[in-house]
Image (spheres, grey):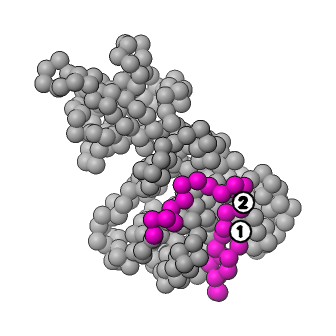
Amino acid sequence: MDVSAFDFHLPEDRIALRPMEPREAARLLCVTEPLSDHTVGDLPDLLQSGDLLVLNDTKVIPAALSAIRPARPVGGGGDVSLTINLHKRTAPDRWRAFIRPAKRLKIGDAVLFADKSASNFRAEVMAIRDGGDVELRFDRSGDALDAAVSAHGRMPLPPYIARKRAADARDERDYQTVYADDPGSVAAPTAGLHFTPQLMARLHDRGVRTARLTLHVGAGTFLPVKSDRTEDHDMHSEWFEIEDETAAEIVETRKTGGRIIAVGTTALRALEASNGRAMSGETDIFITPGYRFRVVDGLMTNFHLPRSTLFMLVSALAGLDRMQAAYAHAIAEEYRFYSYGDSSLIWKA
């Protein structure tokens, strides 16, 4: 399918740089016929008793780091400052990372995350791929590596926000769901950022159940589609886990006639990759129009980039024409887009 079919014009001022306060005050577009405008706080009234919301409980780690590549003894010039964004763990002591400027690195180079003291946190360059994708082997592993990353890192804001402002203390709270539990993501499952304990209590009172899964979001979620046709795009993979309890909730919801609503595209990808069964592993599922959904009936999600895999996914769920119309409405009505923006509730066509 031609990628240009998923294009649309988005004014720059629609990109949200901060979330709404309180979180559930964000707007919510219900993609029905006709479209209807709400707030996230209206969600209990838009759902039914017996419906199941499936949440991604992954927790964002402070994966944005600063470092130096020390001057090489011969032919390397002086120290080089590096901007590092971890994006995929490959071993207890290894991460792949997007590094700038990667062209100043060679295999075997040291990368220091504090000063040049031998006792400080460091890594070695093990591989260099296209696009500034570098594999690092650290001087510690497991929990010790996690602790060092937490001590040195910052919240990894999406690139379209990071280009406009630096991460700050407020992002430590804002860029994390209230139910985050399992550390491992380098980007937030942003549909869940709208939830508050108060909203979850009202959903419970309405008879709406919740279940959890984990999918650790990688930075690949922000990579542009460079191919002209969807069939030629190389989809990134992410690790997920669905436990027995959640699989049982899905079966029970089906038996009692409830609807299964994924909170975020990450939860949807895990559900569809597993067919709603208990399992864990990597998924590179790429959902485009023509895909037949096997598990979800609806999706709560923020507004996505033009020509992105995520806009392709929502178009597969509701239909491309309907989603183009919904996004045109959202732009005209000044909805806020992307990670800190407003939300939508989309039903399967």
User: Could you say which quadrant of the image residue 272 lies in?
Assistant: bottom right
For disc 2, the marked residue is: 24
Say which amino acid is labelled 1.
Thr
Query: Residue at 40% across / 25% down in the picture?
Result: 113
Magenta span covers which residues? 11-38
Quarter of the rendering occupied by the C terminus: bottom right
Name the foreground residue: 84 vs 268.
84
Taking the view exactly as shown, the residue that stands out farthest to the left is 75
Say which amino acid is labelled 2.
Glu
User: Could you say which quadrant of the image residue 76 lies in?
Assistant: top left
Name the foreground residue: 143 vs 337.
337
- 33 left or right of 201? left
Question: Is disc 1 placed on a helix, strand or loop?
Answer: strand
- 5 left or right of 191? left
Q: Is residue 319 above or below residue 197?
A: below
Quarter of the rendering occupied by the N terminus: bottom left
Neighbours of disc 1 within 10 Å: few (<14), some (14-19), many (20+): some
Q: Is residue 91 visible?
A: no
Expressed as whole percent of the image width and height from the top left, the position of residue 174 reads 62, 47
Q: Mark 2 near mark 1, Cβ–Cβ under 8 Å?
A: yes
**What is the spatial separation of the Cα atoms under label 2 and label 1, in whole angstroms?**
7 Å
Query: Residue at 28% across / 39% down in the picture?
Result: 101
Expressed as whole percent of the image width and height from the top left, the position of residue 152 reads 49, 28
Question: Is disc 2 placed on a helix, strand or loop?
Answer: helix
Expressed as whole percent of the image width and height from the top left, the position of residue 39 reads 71, 68
Q: Is residue 86 visible?
A: yes
Residue 21 part of the magenta segment: yes
The tag on residue 39 is 1
Q: Is residue 114 above or below residue 242?
A: above
